[in-house]
Image: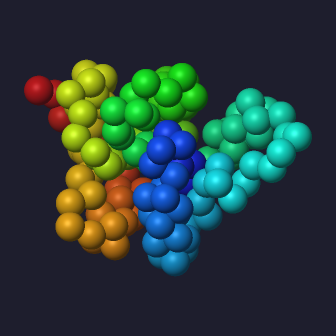
Amino acid sequence: MKVFLSYAQSDREVAGELAAHLAEAGHKVWFAGDALFPGQNIALEVGKALDKSEAMVVLLSPQALKSDWVRQEIEFALGAPQFRGRLIPVMVKPTADVPWILKKLPIVKLGKSIEEASREIGDYIKHGFELTPA
């Protein structure tokens, strides 16, 4: 499955590690750290990647929730049918500013191991999830 990985620059190392685990599991991961080069039209490339993706993993941290790019990518995913049941928030660093709509989704916690978290993320990517009314 084609997966878009959304993250703040400060979380790049974690994003790269997670992208590698997801790729090992057979997913085609769009990771800006590998996909963007100097001189490219970043907005255009991000837009193309979002259009082609079938799932989004968004890394949550205080820096990510302050990022205009991350917020715009989340907004896109919330409105795009291809991401229904496949927008997976991942808590990288504790933050109190998680938007209410993301709190309605299953949030994966990195916890002890990126490898364990990547298996949980992979399961959501593969099978999706259904929201249940609160």
Residue 33 in the figure: left or right of residue 99: right
- Could you tell me how many numbered marks the image carries? 0
Q: How is the image coloured?
A: rainbow
Look at the picture and state if 115 lies above or below 134: below
**Quadrant of the snapshot with the C terminus:** top left
Give 78 or 133, whichever is nearer the viewer: 78
The answer to whether 41 is drawn above or below residue 115 in the figure is above
Q: Residue furthest right?
A: 39
| Of 115 and 85, the residue lying toward us | 115
Which residue in the rendered view is the most extreme toward the front? Answer: 10
Q: Which quadrant: the N terminus? A: bottom right
- Whole-percent x, y for residue 25 in the image: 48, 75
- Say if residue 52 shows up in the picture: yes
Query: Is residue 49 left or right of 119 when viewed as pictured?
Result: right
Q: Residue at x 43, y 58 (%)?
A: 14
User: Percent x, y for residue 106?
Assistant: 24, 44
Looking at the image, residue 91 lies above or below residue 127: above
Percent x, y for residue 110? 27, 58
Q: Is residue 54 at least partly visible in the picture?
A: no
Residue that extends furthest to the bottom in the rendered view of this protein:
24
Instruction: Examine the image and state in which quarter residue 124 appears.
Output: bottom left
> Quick one: which residue is furthest to the left in this view?
134
Residue 15 image point, x, y percent: 48, 56
Q: Tell me: 123 left or right of 53.
A: left
Q: Residue at x 52, y 77 (%)?
A: 24
Q: Residue at 21% of width from left, 60% of height from top?
A: 111
The reply, left or right, for residue 95 in relation to residue 53 is: left
29 relative to 87, above or below: below
User: Which of the 4 image quadrants contains residue 80?
Assistant: top right
Q: Residue at the location (40% across, 45% down)?
A: 59
